[in-house]
Structures are given as structure tokens and as C-alpha cells.
Image: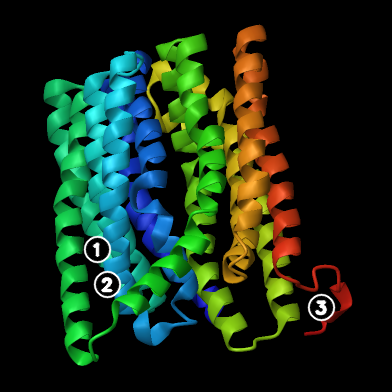
């Protein structure tokens, strides 16, 4: 089955790419103290916020339209760069505003800004590689970037500490962002020469179609950042840099489950879009979705069990307490992976406005709950929010998906006998 082959291929690529920085944990947790590691966590959280805004998430819109308008995908590259320019100005303004508020370190803020600007062409280029089914080229590009990143980290951390890790991430992304931009330019020029000149009206229609898909999704992504980005800042403010360092390492250890969930997501998107566009059986897709969801949960439980026996060998003694946080993040990644399976149908239906109406208010509610819990309770209570928020959001996405695109989710007999 093609979906199984794609999941396996992406899993191999993700394991290779993510295992390299994962292997840095023994080094970083021994070279840095929890309070120092908090610098890296803050950078990661702010970068994740900027990544939502830069390019206005148009790569997801392009991924949705690729199989519906395959002959004109090259036109969307130009559209994407216009969005990048607009969003770059926006995040620069946000950076200046936040800097003068004085709540975030200037080095971390500038580094996150530069990283996100370079990240977008990489995200767009790798999205096109996945859509074209060029898994080898995709894997080669991703793995080479990680190897360069980690090699630079090993040198700089020894000399300048946590800031060295941040600089390594930014510099690596800047170089590969330039490479991705050159490849995208080459694709655009080649396709433009092969096709007849297009009118401005056509460009406007393409731009409008992408915006109709991707703009309403931004609040959904922002809600995700509130659950797994804003919480880092709240932990740092209310519980201190040392707890934030432990919180971040717990999340890193759980990233194995995140890698598995991400691999499934990368494979399921193009597969579902191509199947639906080609008139594939809906019962078959329902069965695949349910089976993958169950497998994600079972894998998470197994991983938590085995972590009891080997995780302490990976991290330094100062970070042992992060193992108490690990199970919460693992289960959260399982729920996020299941959510992503259902989000695909919302994108395909081009009915992302429901995400705007429902997901964003829920995200604001989560932010308020995080603040109230951190203000009135200890960290033991706060860490339960990791699981509770992901579970509630998964149920919300399932509901939105069922409203956006009709699928026989409860036709169990039809799914089993497909």
C-alpha cells in the first residue's frame, strides 16, 4: 500500500534528521545547566511564533491546491514570495514592538527573526519536493541541513555556551534558506519559459485562492503555539529558568513520539489529497485514519514504558527531573498527530474558515487557563495542561473536520469491508 510505503519513507527520513539533534542531548545537558538551556527553549518558542506568520502559511495552501491545479503550481511560487515579503515586514514590526516592551532578550529575539525569514523558503521548497514525491531529494536536503547544524553546534557551544547553539541553528537555516531560494527561482523560471505569459488577473485569482485557505488557518496554528510555545514563556516567568530548562528537555525527549507523528502527517497529507481528487474510496480513508490513530496511541504508551529504563542514560544528572514531565509530552504528541490526520480533510474542503471561528477562541481560552493555573497552582498541576489542552483540541479538530468535509466516520462496517 502506497500510504504505508510513504509513512515508512518519511519515518526513516525523520528518524535520521531528528536523531542527530536528539543525540546532542547528552552533550548539551552536560555542557549546560538548566537555566542556560532555557535560552534555547525561549529561542525555539519565539521562532515557532514567527514561523506561523512568515509567508502567511501559504505553503499549506499550495499543498492543498497542488493536486487540484497541478499544471499551474509554479504560479504559486511567485504568490508565495509576495506573501513572504509582506509577512517579513509584519514580524519585523512585531520584533521592534516586543523589544521595547523589554520582556525578551534582544539576542534571542533577533535570532528568532532571522531564523524565521530563512525558514520559509526551506519550508516551501521541501513542501514541493514532498508533493512531487521526490523523497530522496527531500531527505537529502533535510539531513544535510541537520548535519551542518549539529556540527556547528558542537564547535560553538564549547566556546560560547547556549548562545552558540542558537547561532548554529540560525546560520545553518540561513545557508540552506538561500539554497532553497535558488532552487525555487530555478523552478519558477523554467516553468515560466515553458508556459505562455499569464495575465495579472490570473495571478490575483491564484493569490486569492491561496489566501482563502491559509489565512483562516493562522488562528488554528496560533492556538497550537499557545499550547506548545506560549506555555514555555509562562513556565519561565512563573516557575523560573531552571524549571523551564527541565520542561524543554522533557519535551525534547518526547520528540521521538513527535517524529513518528510528524512522519505520519507528512505522508497522509499528499496521500489523502490525491485519493480524494482522484475519486478514491472514502471508507478506505476512514479505516486508514482510525488505524493510524490507534497505532499512534499504542506507540506512545510503549515509548513511555521504555523511557523508564534508558532515558536516564541520555541526559545529564542536572536534568533527571525532566523525566517526570516526559509522559505528558508523549501523550500530547499522540493527540497532536491524530489532530493532524483530521486537519487534512479541512484543508481539502478549502473550508478553513471554521478554524478561524472555533480554533482561535479556544486558543485564547487556553492562554487564559495557562495564566490562571500558573498564578494559583504549582508546577505539578500546570504540567497536566500539556495533556488536557491537546486532548480538547483534538476533539475540536475532529468536530470541525466532520462539519467541513463529509466522511463516513461512523460507517464502521463499510470501513472494515472496504
Q: Position of residue 71 (x, y in %)?
A: 37, 87
Q: Residue at x 18, y 62 (%)?
A: 181
Cα distance between the residues tagged 3 and 2? 36 Å
Residue 244 appears anywhere in the view? yes
Categorize mark 3 by other alpha carbons within 10 Å: few (<14), some (14-19), many (20+): few
At numbered mark 1, what does the secondary structure look like: helix, strand or loop? helix
Figure quadrant of the N terminus:
bottom right
Pick the front one: 64 or 6: 64
Relative to 414, is 99 above or below?
A: above
Cα distance between the residues tagged 3 and 1? 39 Å
Relative to 12, is 146 above or below?
A: above
At numbered mark 2, what does the secondary structure look like: helix, strand or loop? helix
Q: Residue at x 54, y 33 (%)?
A: 226
Q: Position of residue 219 (x, y in %)?
A: 54, 45
Q: Are marks 2 and 1 in contact (CB under 8 Å)?
A: yes
Q: Residue at x 28, y 20 (%)?
A: 99
Residue 141's tag is 1
Relative to 316, is 196 above or below?
A: below
Q: Along the horizontal axis of the image, is 228 left or right of 386?
A: left
Task: Tell me which numbered mark, 3 or 1, is placed earlier along the sequence.
Answer: 1
Q: Along the horizontal axis of the image, is 233 left or right of 75?
A: right
Which residue has dot 2 on it?
137
Q: Along the horizontal axis of the image, is 325 left or right of 372?
A: left
Which residue has dot 3 on it?
416
Q: Position of residue 247 (x, y in %)?
A: 48, 24
Pick the front one: 116 or 307: 116
Q: Along the horizontal axis of the image, is 252 left or right of 180?
A: right
Residue 11 appears anywhere in the view? no
Q: Residue at x 34, y 48 (%)?
A: 54
How many numbered marks are there? 3
Amino acid at each position: 500500500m502506497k500510504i504505508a510505503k510513504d509513512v515508512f519513507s518519511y519515518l526513516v527520513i525523520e528518524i535520521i534528521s531528528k536523531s542527530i539533534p536528539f543525540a546532542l542531548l547528552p552533550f548539551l545537558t552536560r555542557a549546560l545547566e538548566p537555566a542556560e538551556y532555557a535560552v534555547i527553549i525561549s529561542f525555539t518558542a519565539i521562532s515557532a511564533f514567527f514561523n506561523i506568520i512568515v509567508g502567511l502559511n501559504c505553503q499549506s495552501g499550495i499543498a492543498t491546491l497542488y493536486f487540484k491545479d497541478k499544471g499551474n503550481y509554479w504560479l504559486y511560487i511567485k504568490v508565495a514570495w509576495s506573501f513572504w515579503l509582506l509577512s517579513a515586514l509584519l514580524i519585523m514590526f512585531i520584533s521592534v514592538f516586543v523589544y521595547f516592551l523589554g520582556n525578551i532578550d534582544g539576542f534571542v529575539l533577533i535570532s528568532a527573526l532571522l531564523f524565521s525569514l530563512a525558514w520559509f523558503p526551506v519550508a516551501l521548497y521541501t513542501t514541493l519536493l514532498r508533493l512531487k514525491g521526490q523523497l530522496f531529494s527531500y531527505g537529502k536536503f533535510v539531513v544535510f541541513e541537520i548535519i551542518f547544524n549539529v556540527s556547528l553546534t558542537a564547535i560553538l557551544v564549547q566556546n560560547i555556551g547556549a548562545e552558540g547553539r542558537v547561532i548554529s541553528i540560525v546560520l545553518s537555516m540561513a545557508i540552506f534558506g538561500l539554497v532553497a531560494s535558488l532552487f525555487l527561482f530555478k523552478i519558477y523560471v523554467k516553468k515560466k519559459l515553458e508556459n505562455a505569459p499569464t495575465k495579472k488577473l490570473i495571478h490575483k485569482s491564484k493569490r486569492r485562492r491561496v489566501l482563502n485557505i491559509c489565512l483562516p488557518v493562522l488562528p488554528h496554528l496560533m492556538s497550537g503555539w499557545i499550547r506548545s510555545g506560549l506555555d514555555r514563556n509562562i513556565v519561565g516567568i512563573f516557575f523560573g529558568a531552571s524549571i523551564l530548562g527541565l520542561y524543554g528537555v522533557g519535551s525534547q525527549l518526547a520528540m521521538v513520539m513527535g517524529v513518528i507523528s510528524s512522519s505520519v502527517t507528512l505522508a497522509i497529507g499528499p496521500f489523502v489529497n490525491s485519493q480524494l481528487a482522484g475519486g478514491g474510496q472514502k471508507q478506505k480513508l476512514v479505516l486508514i485514519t482510525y488505524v493510524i490513530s490507534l497505532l499512534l496511541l499504542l506507540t506512545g504508551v510503549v515509548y513511555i514504558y521504555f523511557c523508564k529504563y534508558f532515558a536516564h542514560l541520555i541526559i545529564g544528572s542536572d536534568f533527571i527531573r525532566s523525566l517526570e514531565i516526559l509522559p505528558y509530552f508523549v501523550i500530547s504528541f499522540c493527540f497532536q498527530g491524530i489532530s493532524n490526520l483530521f486537519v487534512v480533510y479541512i484543508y481539502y474542503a478549502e473550508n478553513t474558515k471554521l478554524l478561524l471561528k472555533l480554533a482561535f477562541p479556544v486558543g485564547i481560552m487556553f492562554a487564559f487557563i495557562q495564566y490562571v493555573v500558573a498564578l494559583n497552582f504549582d508546577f505539578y498541576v500546570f504540567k497536566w495542561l500539556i495533556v488536557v489542552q491537546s486532548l480538547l483540541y483534538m476533539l475540536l479538530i475532529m468536530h470541525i473536520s466532520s462539519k467541513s468535509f463529509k466522511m463516513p466516520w461512523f460507517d464502521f462496517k463499510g470501513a472494515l469491508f472496504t
